[in-house]
Image (cartoon, helix red, strand yellow):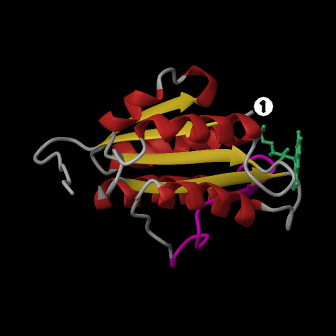
Amino acid sequence: MKFFFRRGIMSKILIISYSQTGNTKKMAQAVGEGVKDAGGEPDVVNVEDFGDVEKLIGYDGIIMGSPTYFGILAAPLKDFIDRSIKVYKQLDGRVGGAFASSGVQGGGNETTIHSITQALKVHGFVMPGFSRIGHYGPAAVGEADEKIISECKYMGTSVTTLA
Ligand SMILES: Cc1cc2nc3c(=O)[nH]c(=O)nc-3n(C[C@H](O)[C@H](O)[C@H](O)COP(=O)(O)O)c2cc1C
């Protein structure tokens, strides 16, 4: 089994999300700012616009965001993950993370985050947990406020540092 590490160059981090009404997108942009703050190169992309999943191989880190739909990730992001089978066994060792938005408190943000990180683990990702912010990743109820935006930046910075 071989692992390939990109050394001495800026970490390329993909922040890919689905967002129908903008709440998750706002979080994605803040995660991207955190990546930049840590000296990484962020690509903030809507899942519908990503194109061929083979491009995933070019990233050192991949962070996924979704609104909570019935307690789990939204179907367009799940479809993207299912299509990523094309690059199965080629993403081992990448650094990952997840964030979510819900309509109500207790509406399923944590289960949504877990539904994403479960899939990333199957791909062989390494993922940090957090003691200083939401432990599994940033979780917003409705539009992210200042606190959640700073959590999103923190996660972007952490994932980039680890990558
Ligand atoms: C089909 C559907 C299912 C939803 N299911 C839940 C849910 O289970 N729990 C919850 O708190 N909010 C639920 N919501 C609300 C969204 O998660 C919430 O409005 C979210 O902030 C939308 O994110 P967006 O602006 O990025 O699209 C649901 C919304 C839709 C459209």
Q: Give the magenta range.
A: 131-145
Prevailing secondary structure class for the magenta stretch in the rendered image: loop
Residue located 81% across and 62% down the image: 108
Q: Quadrant of residue 41?
A: top left
Tell me where residue 138 appears, x and y as whole percent. 62, 60
Using the rendered image of the protein, determine whether residue 7 is visible from the camera's viewpoint: yes
Give the farthest residue toward the left: 8
Image side of residue 120 versus residue 106, left or right: left
Q: Quadrant of residue 152?
A: bottom right
Image side of residue 138 versus residue 140, left or right: left
Tell me where residue 124 appears, x and y as whole percent. 40, 58
Residue located 34% across and 37% down the image: 57
Whether residue 139 appears in magenta in the rendering, the answer is yes
Count the marks: 1
Q: CB of residue at label 1: within 8 Å of ligand 1?
A: yes
- Between 82 and 77, the one nearer to me in the picture: 82
Q: Can you say whether 35 is above or below 57 in the image?
A: below
Using the rendered image of the protein, determine whether residue 145 is visible from the camera's viewpoint: no
Q: Tell me the SS state at disc 1.
A: loop
Q: Residues within 10 Å of mark 1 (few under 14, many from 20)?
A: few
User: Residue at label 1?
Assistant: 20
Tell me where residue 86 appears, x and y as whole percent. 46, 34
Q: Amino acid at mark 1?
A: Gln
Q: Quadrant of the N terminus?
A: bottom left
Q: Can you say whether 43 is above or below 156 in the image?
A: above
Q: Quadrant of residue 93?
A: bottom left
Residue located 44% across and 64% down the image: 127
Whether residue 134 appears in magenta in the rendering, the answer is yes
- Between 85 and 7, the one nearer to me in the picture: 85
Tell me where residue 68 appears, x and y as whole percent. 79, 51
